[in-house]
């Protein structure tokens, strides 16, 4: 790979610093964020220039603009520690995470309620079935004894066993 001239390198560093200032002010391109990928795209340098390189013998050497990447991350941390929100999407993400956590809690509570109601329904149906079986057993027992008489059905319009006056 060809080496760049000192003049080109200085121009690139100046472009990276200008892009760094824009990003830290919150001036993002569409679809961009406050990260090294956007910084490289805005400065029109390769992103790999921000990372360490390996020599042929396996040793590492700093990337041409690695010091600028470290400066960018340091400045970004300083801004964030000061309480400023550089990227509004970060605050939106945090708000959405809190909302998701709250919804998960509500969902867990509803699941617990559904489980309790299902258990109650199962118990109620079981009790009704047991009561039905008991009623059937008592009816069969009563029919088998033979000393139980049914009262005659009353005729409409008559009082059953005399007047109440």
Image (cartoon, grey):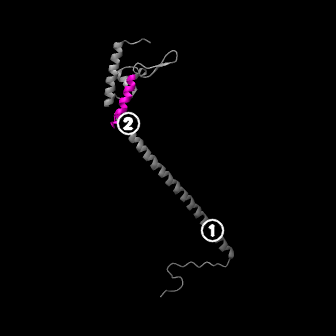
What distance separates the C-alpha of mark 2 from that of mark 1?
A: 66 Å
Q: Nearer the viewer, mark 2 or mark 1?
A: 2
Is residue 140 shown left or right of residue 99?
right
Q: What residue is shown with label 1?
A: 134
> Toward the viewer: 91 or 60?
60
Coordinates of residue 30 in the picture (x, y in percent): 34, 29
Span colored in magenta? 67-85
68 within the magenta span:
yes
Q: What residue is at 50 percent from the left and 51 percent from the top?
A: 111
Location of residue 7 with respect to 114 vertically, above or below:
above
As rendered, which of 79 and 138 lies closer to the eye?
Answer: 79
Magenta stretch: residue 8 in it? no
Prevailing SS of the magenta stretch: helix
Where is residue 84 shown, x and y percent of the image?
33, 36
Local secondary structure at mark 1? helix
| Crowd class of label 1 (few under 14; some 14 to 19; many from 20; radius 10 Å) | few
Q: Is residue 16 left or right of residue 150?
A: left
Asked if residue 128 is positioned above or below residue 100 in the image, the reply reads below
Q: Quadrant of residue 1?
A: top left
Label 2: which residue?
Answer: 90
């Amino acid at each position: 790979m060809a080496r760049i001239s000192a003049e080109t390198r200085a121009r690139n560093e100046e472009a990276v610093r200008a892009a760094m200032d824009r990003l830290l002010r919150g001036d993002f391109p569409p679809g961009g964020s406050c990260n090294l990928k956007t910084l490289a795209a805005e400065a029109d340098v390769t992103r790999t220039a921000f990372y360490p390189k390996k020599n042929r013998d396996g040793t590492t050497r700093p990337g041409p603009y690695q010091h600028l990447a470290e400066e960018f991350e340091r400045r970004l941390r300083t801004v964030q520690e000061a309480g400023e929100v550089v990227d509004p999407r970060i605050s939106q993400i945090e708000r959405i995470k809190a909302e998701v956590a709250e919804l998960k809690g509500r969902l867990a509570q509803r699941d617990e309620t559904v489980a309790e109601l299902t258990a109650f329904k199962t118990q109620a149906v079981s009790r009704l079935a047991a009561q039905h079986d008991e009623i059937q057993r008592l009816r069969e027992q009563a029919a088998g004894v033979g000393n139980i008489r049914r009262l005659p059905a009353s005729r409409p319009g008559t009082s059953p066993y005399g007047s109440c006056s």
